[in-house]
Structures are given as C-alpha cells and as structure tokens.
Image (tube, grey):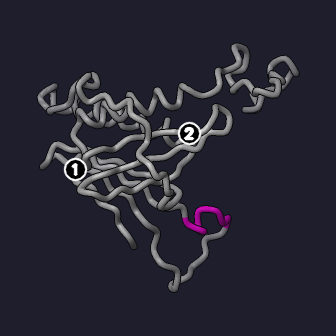
C-alpha cells in the first residue's frame, strides 16, 4: 500500500477548481520538494472540516483547556493561495480518519483511496488486489484550525442555496422541491 506521509507538511490545504456547480475538489499536501494531490467530493471536504473542529474542541474540553489547541484559526496561518500546479490527482478519496496524537500534540488525518469494494454492494475478496493508497498528514492544532477555516470557505464559495429548500440553485434554473409539494429528503 503506497502511503504518502507528511509529518509535518509545508502546506496542507483543501481547494477547488472550476465554476460553481461543476467544481472539482482536492486535498493537497506538500513538503521537501514533493506534492500529493487527492480528489474528493465537496461533502467530504465539509465533513472533514466539521469533524476536525469537533475533534479539536473535544481535545480542548477533555484537557480542561490546557491542550495546545487554539479556539480560533490563527490569522498568520491563513492560506488564501490557490492550489499548487500541476493539479495531478494521485487518487480519489474513499474513506477518511482523524486522530489526536497526545505525544506530539498533533492531528493525524488519513485519506484512503476509494476501492472497488467501496462501490460494490457485496464485499469482494481478492487477495491479488493491491492495497489502497493512503495520504497521511500530521499537523498542529493551529494548522488544523486554519485548514478548517479555508475548507469551509471553499465549500461556501459554491452555488448559493435556495432560501426555501436549502438545495443549491442551478444556473439552468431551480425547481424547488418544497414548492412542488415534496422534498428530496422524503420528509
């Protein structure tokens, strides 16, 4: 299994390329002359940012406020620059995991390559299949807060939501599911 390990990276960011409604989302890690770019879905970026904030808040709560976790993203760590070029996707992300390493006071983020098993209803056992690739990044709590802030800004920069149903407005026109008497989430 190829593991792209960054401990710590010089840069770790979420970014998007394209116009709202047809953007492609990426995580990008860079250090010591190498770079890894992985593709993922918009909702995965949003969930990663939310879970990172929840993890950091929980570490802070459990430590009684003594853990080296800032409540807000430090201004000096804000990264507004575009993704590094070239944007060559190393793999697509399937699952992600987060952890707090108390020995180093760092957040560990793992993004694992989507596998054929992720798309199958029934698990397929294939001992000849190579293991999935993994992007593993170790960052400080402050860098994690800055990552979260940027990621949420990237997600929010898309199409504006419909004020009635909350779904994104389409450039071609929006048929609001609330006005049609039904909702997309079956409630």
Asked whether 21 or 165 is in front, the reply is 21
Indicate whether residue 117 is drawn in magenta. Answer: yes
Q: Is residue 182 left or right of residue 5?
A: right
Instruction: Point out the frontmost of discs 1 and 2.
Output: 1
- Looking at the picture, how far across and down is residue 160, in whole percent? 64, 21
Relative horizontal placement of residue 43, taking residue 108 as reference (left or right): right
Identify the residue at horizontal 15%, vertical 33% (top origin). 67
Task: Work out whether 46 lies above or below 168.
Answer: below
Residue identified by numbered label 1: 8
Instruction: Characterize the local packing of mark 2: few (<14), some (14-19) or many (20 or more) Cα atoms within 10 angstroms.
Output: few
* Mark 1 surroundings within 10 Å by alpha-carbon count, few (fewer than 14), some (14 through 19), many (20 or more): some
Compared to residue 69, the image places residue 16 above or below, namely below
Residues drawn in magenta: 115-121
Q: Is residue 54 visible?
A: no
Count how many numbered circles sit on residues in the image. Answer: 2
Observer-nearest residue: 53 or 135?
135
- Separation of marks 1 and 2 at Cα, in angstroms: 25 Å
User: Does the magenta portion include 34?
Assistant: no
Q: Disc 2 marks which residue? A: 43
Question: Please, what secondary structure does the residue beneath circle 1 have?
Answer: loop
């Amino acid at each position: 299994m190829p593991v792209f390990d960054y401990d710590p990276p010089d840069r770790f960011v979420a970014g998007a390329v394209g116009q709202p409604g047809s953007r492609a989302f990426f995580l990008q890690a860079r250090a010591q002359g190498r770079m890894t770019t992985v593709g993922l879905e918009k909702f995965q970026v949003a969930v990663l940012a939310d879970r990172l904030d929840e993890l950091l808040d929980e570490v802070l709560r459990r430590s009684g406020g003594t853990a080296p976790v800032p409540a807000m993203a430090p201004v000096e760590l804000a990264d507004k620059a575009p993704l590094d070029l070239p944007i060559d996707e190393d793999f697509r992300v399937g699952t992600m995991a987060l952890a707090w390493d108390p020995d180093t006071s760092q957040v560990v983020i793992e993004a694992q390559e989507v596998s054929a098993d992720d798309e199958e209803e029934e698990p397929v056992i294939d001992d000849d299949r190579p293991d999935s690739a993994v992007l593993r990044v170790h960052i400080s709590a402050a860098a994690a807060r800055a990552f979260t802030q940027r990621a949420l800004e990237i997600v929010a920069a898309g199409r504006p939501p419909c004020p009635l149903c909350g779904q994104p407005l389409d450039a071609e026109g929006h048929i609001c599911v609330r006005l049609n008497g039904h909702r997309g989430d079956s409630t």
